[in-house]
Image (spheres, helix red, strand yellow):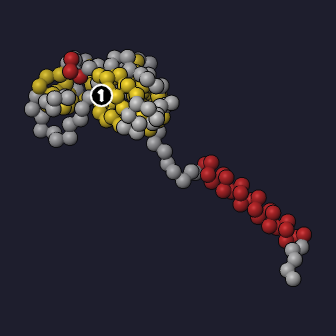
Amino acid sequence: MFSLTNKSLIRIAIISVLSSVLITLFLLFNPFDDYDPLYVSGKTLYIKSYEPLIVKEYGYLDFDNLQKKITAPEGKSLAILNIEITNAASAEIRIISNENSSEFMSKDGFTYTPVNPASISKIAAIDDQDLSYPIWGSFTLNNLERAEGFLLFIVKDSFKPNKFSWVSSDRVLISFD
């Protein structure tokens, strides 16, 4: 018959404790899954942001599939923030994207609000095939539906992104490094 001595039990206990400590430390300081810091959830919405594009001109498609072009005013730039908004709630949600729906904060302390692209754009023929749509106006998202598009901000030429905050129908804060 097989029996364990006290020394064997103590060795097994010590090995088990050391193994669990090592595995716990590995999970805390080096998790298996990398996360995207630009993909953040609120109470009902998941918002994924991409690094903002700072340009002087930008071409896009409006909701009638007309190609339009936006040009920055003198001394300013356009900050184009492509985002995806996903409804993670069990019911439909009404989303309103306007001047009060979000804020873009710069590292120098200025806060910018979105601008309606249709108010400052002109019809133009653009060769780029990968044009996106603005997220502007009101729309309804059902459970697990997603809206993709861009928000337009008119910013100073020295703009350096710090934080993006979605404040309409949920509160989501995304930090940029």
Label count reads: 1
Q: Residue at left 47%, top 39%?
A: 37
Q: Position of residue 28 (x, y in %)?
A: 62, 48
Q: Position of residue 34 (x, y in %)?
A: 49, 48
- Is residue 174 shown left or right of residue 97? right
Q: Residue furthest right?
A: 6
Residue 38 seen in render: no
- Is residue 70 shown left or right of residue 5? left
Toward which corner of the image does residue 7 lie, by quadrant? bottom right
**What secondary structure is found at the residue carrying circle 1?**
loop
Of residues 42 and 92, the one drawn nearer to the viewer in this rendering: 92
Q: Position of residue 135 (x, y in %)?
A: 30, 28
Q: Residue furthest left?
A: 125
Given the image, on which type of amino acid does mark 1 rest? Ile
Q: Residue at left 19%, top 24%?
A: 70
* Quadrant into which the N terminus falls: bottom right
- Is residue 146 shown left or right of residue 35? left
* Quadrant into which the C terminus falls: top left
**Residue placed under numbered mark 1 in the picture:** 135
Of residues 168 and 30, the one drawn nearer to the viewer in this rendering: 168
Of residues 72 and 135, the one drawn nearer to the viewer in this rendering: 135
Residue 70 seen in render: yes
Toward which corner of the image does residue 68 lie, by quadrant? top left
Toward which corner of the image does residue 48 lie, by quadrant? top left
Q: Residue at left 67%, top 52%?
A: 24
Q: Residues within 10 Å of mark 1 (few under 14, many from 20)?
A: many
Q: Residue at left 13%, top 30%?
A: 66
- Is residue 39 shown left or right of residue 23? left
Q: Position of residue 83 (x, y in %)?
A: 35, 34
